[in-house]
Amino acid sequence: MNVRYRVTLSEPERARLEGLVAHGRTKVREVKRAQILLAAAAAQGEAQIAAAVGTSLATIYRTKRCFVEEGLESALHDAPRPGGRRKLSGKEEALLIATACSAPPEGRARWTLDLLADRMVALTGHPNLSDETVRRRLAENELKPWQQKMWCVPTINSEYVARMEDVLELYAAPADPKRPVVSLDESPIQLIGESRVPLPPEPGKLRRYDCEYVRHGTANLFVCVDVNQPWRHVKVTARRTNADFAVFVRELVDLHYAEAECVRVVLDNLSTHSAAALYDTFDPAEARRILRRIEFHYVPKHASWLNMVEIEIGVLKKQCLDRRIPDVALVRSEIAAWEKARNESGARIEWMFTVERARKKLGKVYRQLEAGREESSRQEVARKVAA
């Protein structure tokens, strides 16, 4: 470091460096180099600059040398590094992708990095191949064969549209105390206890709990939410049977909506969600009495997102049940406290999806239905002419 490099900045260079330091959105390395150049231009000593910027004398020397010999861009940015030669050629990478997309070896559920590396060694002339090489080449192509995703594509036909518009019209209808609209669904919950007492949080320490737990079985939650009022109710049951559903429906019409003429209930297509469940549980006269005061409206199959209560169940699990709760009694007390507080807060679900938006969003489906009607009309006319 015998050569002394003197930094002299032009006005545009000074303005750019000051902008880099002021904005603070650039890489830390570039900001530090800008600070070094500004300090050097102000004739500060290297020891003073190192203490102020928090860097080494060698870094200051290299930055000043790059600026004097190669210019501002070279001083701020490192030259691109070539890196090591890629082990896999273009054809070999294509072979790797094809292998990862093929069926896994017999006895294996899916490809792993180890299996792919071994297969590529067998298919190519490489003596060995690391898992990291395979991972990087797959990552470049956004491919993860060890992961999988389940999907369910609903059949969007006239039945789907009819049920969807029926539910959406219920949501959009004016509030009628005599004919309230209630969204209903069920959700299972596991009863989990601690194997060891968790340690409470402390300043600088998170709450700590043991990875081991004790499973105490399961319970079921019946959840309903009023579409037009800030009210929801949760009932915890041990099981999810026809009888449990029938009893919950009777409580809905006789206890929670005793003054209503008819309770319109939106629910999914679970096998227990039917009028038959009431006849399986009560005598015919009682079942018929309840059914006179209730009206079931079903969302389309594989379209539970249309059931408004799904949103409320998500809130319940996040705010109240996102922890280990060992027994049904504690679940009931905790949910009762959550339910009371949420009802008193006036929280409501703001439903934005309407029939008009559905017809716009699913325009292709509606055009297909229209084409089907026109084709049926043409066939009918042709039959009449032929007759």
Image (cartoon, grey):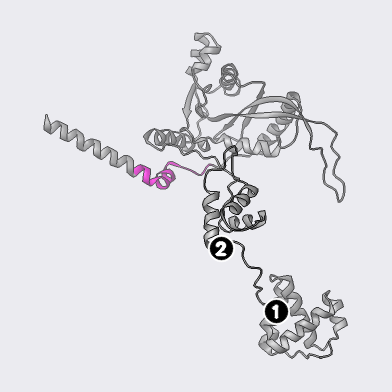
Residue at mark 2: 89
In the displayed structure image, the side of residue 218 where residue 281 appears, left or right: left
Q: Main secondary structure of the magenta part?
A: helix
In this rendering, the answer to whether 20 lies above or below 358 is: below
In the displayed structure image, the side of residue 26 where residue 159 appears, left or right: left
Residue at mark 1: 76
Decide whether residue 359 is among the magenta residues. yes
- Disc 1 crowd rating (10 Å Cα; few below 14, some 14-19, many 20+) is some
Percent coordinates x, y for residue 85 in the rendering: 63, 68
Q: Residue at x 63, y 55 (%)?
A: 135
Q: Nearer the viewer, residue 273 or 255?
A: 273
Q: Nearer the viewer, mark 2 or mark 1?
A: 2
Q: Nearer the viewer, residue 231 or 248?
A: 248
Residue range of the region highlighted in magenta in the rendering: 351-366
Percent coordinates x, y for residue 338 in the rendering: 71, 34
In this rendering, the answer to whether 91 lies above or below 175 is: below
Percent coordinates x, y for residue 51 in the rendering: 87, 77
Earlier-in-chain disc, 2 versus 1: 1
In the displayed structure image, the side of residue 149 where residue 337 appears, left or right: right
